[in-house]
Each structure stands twice: as C-alpha cells, then as structure tokens.
Image (tube, rainbow, N blue to C red):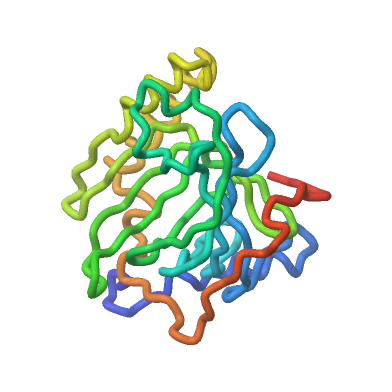
Amino acid sequence: MADDDGTVTDPTVTAATAAAAGGGTAYWSPGSQILWRYRENGGPRPHIARPVTVVRDDAEVLAVWLAPGTECIRPVLADGTPVHLEPLETRYTKPRTVQRDRWFGTGVLKLARPGQPWSVWLFWDQGWRFKNWYVNLEEPLSRWDGGVDSEDHFLDISVHPDRGWSWHDEDEFAQARGDGLVDAGLAARVRAAGRAAVEVINAWGPPFADGWQHWRPDPDWAVPSLPDDWDRTPAHVSS
C-alpha cells in the first residue's frame, strides 16, 4: 500500500513479527501451512476445515491465503445434499455429516485481529478485479499448533469498494435463533460485535484502509494439502 509520502509499504511486513523471539506468542512464518477450522454450532467438533498459507502473523493480525482448488472439509446433510440447497426452515435441524470438497473459484484472503469477534475476508473476480470485503462474525480465533479454530455466528456484513456496506444472512441468523443454536445472550453479543464492526467500517479503520486489496500471493506457494487428521483435538489451545 502507498504511504502519504508515496512510498510503498508491504502490509505483510511489520516490526511486530519479532515478538515471537521474545518468548511470547509463537507466530507462524509467512509461507507456513495451517488449518482454519470452524466448530459445528452447539457442538465441539470441527465441521469446516480449510488448509491455508500464512501471509502474515503477528500481534496485530493473522493473514492467510485460501488458494483456488484447495481440498477442504465442508458440512452437508446426511444424504449428501449441500446445506445451502436445503430450505431455510429445515436447514439447521436435519442430520448432517461432512465431506471432502474443493474451494472453487478465486482464492480468498482472510484477516483476523487477535481477540476480535470477526474476521475480514477479501474476494476478487477473475483477473484480480477486487470484488468486496466480507466481515464474518464469529468467536475470536483460538490458536493451536496446527492452526486456528472458531465458531461461525451466521450474521455477516458485506463491504463494497465504494465503502458502502450491508448486513448479510440476517434470515439465517433469525432461523438459527429460532432453532435454538443462538440463545439470547449470544444473539446480543453477536449484534454488539456487528455494531462494533460497523464502527470500524464507517471510520475506515484496519484492515479496510491497509491496502490488502492490492496484495497478491507468492506464485511459488504450493496449494496446501488437507491432512488426514484434520479433525484432531489440539493438545493445547490458546486465544
């Protein structure tokens, strides 16, 4: 990204990356391959697992790249029906399983600040035409030796290149509340997190003003593989 004096600053570089040498949080080096997982709502098991490549990891942000064609784990109904094809009224009550699949389309850059109850995803159309930011409201990421875990909170925010924004998946959030997956306390926390995210958007704070839309992956990076033990229970988890 360009500074006020016209020089170009790489958003993946910061002095905070030296913090790991001081005996604090162990940060992953750029190019490391980790898992970005989501637990099933109301349960302990991961039902989404995506191998990603670390772009930057320090006290300010974890940035990872989900490459096109990456083999992932995604939830499906017990009969194999994709979740998004099931009518909303029964989407969260029918039995589910998981299956291996691939991330099709363009890749996604995911950004998460430590302790923040959302992550921000960047999407591009073909030819690296920037499409939008997507604020995914979720539990703050928990770190473990193989990656990070969270739980999705259904409600999201779409942020457009002109800085306009809109709520996304409000119908799914309402259905999840009605089906008992989101109680009143969690609903209040999610709404509060959404309002806090909107304040950052309106102020055009990080990461929206940080130039990440101009970032490009290292062409030498290999597409990460999905490990056989993608669902393993971490021996140690820290926030």
Q: Nearer the viewer, residue 73 or 133?
A: 73
Q: Where residue 201 appears, x then y in whole percent?
A: 31, 43
**Vertical relation: 20 (above or below) 235:** below
Q: Where residue 181 appears, x then y in whole percent?
A: 52, 21
Figure disc tally:
0
Where is residue 19, by image quadrant? bottom right
Q: Where residue 225 appears, x then y in whole percent?
A: 60, 70
**Vertical relation: 169 (above or below) 90:** below
Outermost residue, bottom side: 220
**Vertical relation: 201 (above or below) 224:** above
Outermost residue, right side: 235
| The C terminus: image quadrant | top right
Residue in the image at 66% along x and 45% along y: 142
Residue in the image at 50% along x and 26% along y: 94
Outermost residue, left side: 162
In-image side of 225 versus 195 (left or right): right
Q: Nearer the viewer, residue 104 or 56?
A: 104
Residue in the image at 75% along x and 46% along y: 237
